[in-house]
Amino acid sequence: DVKVTQSSRYLVKRTGEKVFLECVQDMDHENMFWYRQDPGLGLRLIYFSYDVKMKEKGDIPEGYSVSREKKERFSLILESASTNQTSMYLCASREGTSGRNTQYFGPGTRLTVL
Amino acid sequence: AQSVTQLDSQVPVFEEAPVELRCNYSSSVSVYLFWYVQYPNQGLQLLLKYLSGSTLVESINGFEAEFNKSQTSFHLRKPSVHISDTAEYFCAVSDPVSSGSARQLTFGSGTQLTVLP
């Protein structure tokens, strides 16, 4: 079974703090993704990575950056957290680059920025 | 650009009743279509997907969805729901032709299915 794990289920941070969200997958997948999930908006893609050290912006990259130093790990960074970044963050991985392949999701990190 | 519309944000239904969750997409090209399910306090998991061939696809737990190209729809149905089907359901689309970010998934806003005893 594919396993995608995220470092925290719940996180509370203060405005202006630097926040790291970690994601690890154990299936040697090339592609990894970060989404945020908000009520009524579904999932929106923040960034994705198609290989180590390679990244591409998604639909809402502003205020975020990412790092992929190893194939199994994809980190989302909030350089200076703001209250409008309070959300559920979901990480996913996928084998290969084809849009037909299934994305496998982690359990999510619920981030609250005070 | 692709978009996905899930017309119902909340669908309450009694146990053992049938249910249909609606999904429409906009795309000028052929598409891959997906339904993902999110149980409470969990991430999303794939329920079923349409890639090509038969327009009716089924999941292992009794859900089915039919790809209708003329109506650009991919509605999800189950003839008899259980309490355990209570979850949020997301329709998603990807474009098999384009490259780069265009091949990523575009999600609908989700439908919360609540099965009542």
Image (cartoon, grey):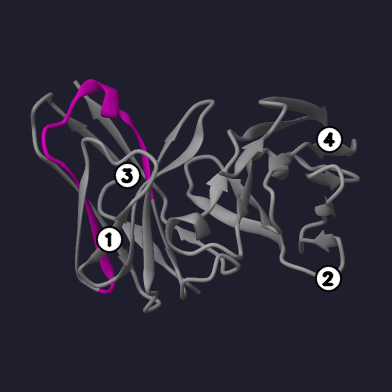
Chain letter belonging to callout 1: A
Where does label 3 land, which residue?
A9
Work out whether residue B88 can be spotted.
no
Badge 4 marks a residue whose secondary structure is: loop
Where does label 2 land, which residue?
B53
The residues tagged by marks 2 and 3 sit, at their Cα atoms, a distance apart of 39 Å
Q: In this rendering, is residue A43 above or below A96?
A: above
- The residue most toward the bottom is A28
- Expressed as whole percent of the image width and height from the top left, the position of residue A47 reads 32, 51
> What amino acid is labelled 4 in the image?
Glu
Stretch in magenta: A71-90
The residues tagged by marks 3 and 1 sit, at their Cα atoms, a distance apart of 24 Å
> What amino acid is labelled 3 in the image?
Arg
User: Residue at the spot x=39%, y=63% of the render?
Assistant: A4
Chain letter belonging to callout 3: A
Nearer the viewer's eye, disc 1 or disc 4? 1
